[in-house]
Amino acid sequence: MQPQRNRLWHQRLRDFVIGAVAALGLSPFGLWPVALVALALILRRVGAAKTGREAFWRGLFAGAGWFGLSLNWIVQPFFVDPWRHGWMAPFALLLIAFGLGLFWGLAGLIARRAGGGAMAFALALSLTELARGFVLTGFPWSLPGHIWLDTALVQMGALMGGYGMTALTLIALAAPFSYGWRRGGAVSTAILALGVGWSGYRLSLPEPAPRDTVLRIVQPNIAQNLKWDPEEARSNFTRLLSMTAGARADLVIWPETSVPYLVTEGDGAALSIAQAGGDALVVAGYQRDEGAAAWNTLGVFGPGGRISQTFDKIHLVPFGEYMPMGDLLYDRFGIRAFASQAGAGYSAGLARNLLDFGATGGRALPLICYEAIFPGDLVTDERPDWILQATNDAWFGTLTGPYQHFAQTRLRAIEQGLPLIRAANTGISAVVDARGFVATDREGQPARLGLGLQGVIDAQLPGPMAPPPYARMLRSVGEAPLLIFLLSGLLVRVLSARRRAVGRAGA
């Protein structure tokens, strides 16, 4: 019994390691050839499981390895105040790795019920990864299709989005195992040809002319452990003001929650922001409150400290910006969400209103931090002219998180065919055009500031492209076509498995 148990745990460890190796295809590593081999091994191993139980465990441990490596940055918030929260870090990493790994385990179970095989697991995993973007408010970070985000094939996002890229990647890898190397190889080659052909077409389209609007993006590089220190507040605020003053720009953009004070229209902080902007409007992230409620907000500051437009963050981070049963936990135990500096946590905004900067600046779709990982959060009644993301990626550390977040944000620009302006506290700030490329600044240099740098970007606002197929699909029917395709594929597998079973019984 003991040797058998040891072999079992060796297999579990092997699945975990293969999953972790597969995650090397994601940013910032970008080892997509390694990822393809590892993902193919996972598809084959889980698809070959003889029972639903075994398929579940193989999928669970492979998923835990994938998420354990790719989401290692999840420990970083616990080390902002290490004496208070540091002990939670390893538990948080294990919880998120195996918690999200359950989606891969469930996919293994579904695949086995559909007759097993690599293709059944590819379809089931594509389905559960789609579900991961919506269940319990969703968390579509580190999709298998994200291995392409730093390659030319990222342009497939304009055709089918990140979920579709995931499905096509897994199907292409599973085809040779399911249909033989000749037929399956033909399927894989056809999918590759589609990706290369579409990407080449997308990159051949003319680059839209930039707008006349000149932007200044401010990256203050304030360490997270000093961001809310009362003794550092004046120094941090002065840094932002000095980096804004004298800007030859029409619009200045500060990062998420960059103002270290609660702000109301016309007060001292609002007036200082407006004065620093001079003739330029300033879009700044700040916290506002009404009674016991508080919001993570973007505001447009103008003459006299007037706040002419606001946007309250809608898609809040669980445990980071709000706590389940938050009021009870705060009142009884003083437990509050990590990022909140007022009460138990933030309240969610009610509407994703566009920020209107007139005929020259156009209308911007505001996204605050985490909201940029959700394709559906970019669907609005009216199409914007550009995307504005304000974020504080200091929470994500410096190893993997900020690079992954920036790569996913670039994918949103490609999916929508819209330029993206990104202001990040510690980086990565950038001006990204409608095809996902970093634009150039007014000096002809890449309009990008890396991690851990303090500085500004002065650049023109790029122009939009026509809405690509994925943007039009999201606006009309959401992810329904992909959902129907995956469910239909699994249904065909189930029916085929039943026919085979009946044939064997008749024989």
Image (tube, rainbow, N blue to C red):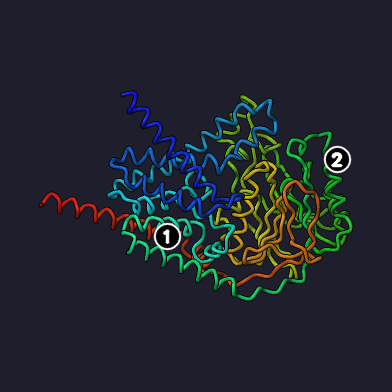
| Residue at 24 percent of width and 56 percent of height | 496
How would you rate the neighbour count of disc 2 (Cα within 10 Å): few for under 14, some for 14-19, many for 20 or more?
few
- Judged left or right of residue 52, residue 167 is right
Decide if residue 245 is on the left or right side of residue 188.
right
From the viewer's side, name the closer residue of 439 and 35. Answer: 35
Q: In which quadrant of the rendered view does residue 463 lie?
A: bottom right
Number of marks: 2
Q: Give me the C-alpha separation between circle 1 and circle 2.
A: 51 Å
Q: For the residue marked with disc 1, what is the amino acid?
A: Leu
Residue that label 2 marks:
234
Picture quarter with the N terminus: top left
The disc label shown at residue 482, or none: 1
Disc 2 residue type (three-letter): Arg
Q: Position of residue 334 (x, y in %)?
A: 65, 27
Crowding around mark 1 (Cα neighbors within 10 Å: few <14, some 14 to 19, many 20+) is some
The residue sitting at 30% across, 48% down in the picture is: 116
Disc sitting over residue 205 in the figure: none
Horizontal and vertical percent position of residue 414: 59, 63
Residue drawn at 36 percent across, 58 percent down? 175
